[in-house]
Image (spheres, helix red, strand yellow):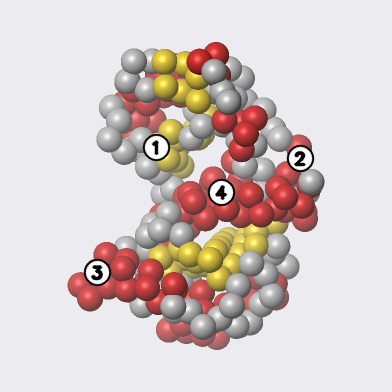
Amino acid sequence: MASKKHYEDLGFAKVDHHRHHRKGFPEVIYCAGKTPPQIAKIAKSIADKGQNVLATRADKKAYLAVKKVLKKAKYYETARIIIVKKKVDSRMSNTEHRIAIVTAGTSDLPVASEAAVTAEFLGLKVDRIFDVGVAGIHRLMKNLPQIQKAKVVIVVAGMEGALPSVVGGLIDKPIIAVPTSVGYGSSFKGLSALLTMLNSCAPGIAVVNIDNGFGAAVMSFSILKSLNR
């Protein structure tokens, strides 16, 4: 059990410095609902312990606040992620830890980018295969050989969310499906895609929450990290 020595109490947050020992990566900052000064203070607390910093759902105001205290901060606008990389984890840096991130449409890019940037932060190799949805299935077929090279495949789709089922019927790799809130009114902000993915008849598909690219990347990391044991 972690003691108080394993976290830092900032008053508004208790920063978990022990998490990288338990999970293999440091605490990640979820920026929504936090002020830019709070985000910057948490980021500095993590960096001061020699850990890499990842902040999700960040806007430019948050980035500028972090940049003031951590000059090496980088902002990935499409992914809405701030990263400060202080060290490289060589354990995950080999071609065996390659994933593919596949999207149905260009509108799914923010969520797919969140997954891709997070996965690369965690040391995974990422192939991006975008805009290959079921409305033009020939695009998927042309890219199938590249998808099949991956150890884990993240499939991101909104609208009716059919793409993970199609991919699941064609490959033998673990698939993590990510429903997005892309679509017209009857998509119910991603609920229709979520239900389609949960009800898939293709085996070997797991589903994360709506728009949760971060969660899909961490699950990929957990699967591939287990290969090192």
Residue position marked by numbered label 1 in the rendering: 30
In the figure, is residue 219 to the left or right of 43? right
For residue 91, the mark is 2
Question: Which quadrant of the figure has residue 63?
Answer: top left
Q: Nearer the viewer, residue 170 or 64?
A: 170
**Element class at badge 3:** helix
CB under 8 Å between callouts 1 and 4? Answer: no
- 191 or 92: nearer the eye? 191
* Location of mark 4 (residue): 218
Identity of the residue furthest to the front in this view: 1
Left or right relative to 5: residue 186:
left
Q: Between disc 2 and disc 4, whose residue precedes?
A: 2
Specify the amino acid type for callout 4: Val
Expressed as whole percent of the image width and height from the top left, the position of residue 94 reads 78, 48
Mark 2 / mark 1, whichever is N-terminal: 1
* Position of residue 2 measured from the top left corner of the image (x, y, whole percent): 56, 23
Location of mark 3 (residue): 188
SS label for mark 1? strand
Circle 1: residue type: Tyr
Classify 10 Å Cα crowding around label 3: few (below 14), some (14-19), many (20 and above): some
Q: Residues within 10 Å of mark 1 (few under 14, many from 20)?
A: some
Q: Do the residues labelled 2 and 4 touch (CB within 8 Å)?
A: no
Numbered mark located on residue 130 in the image: none
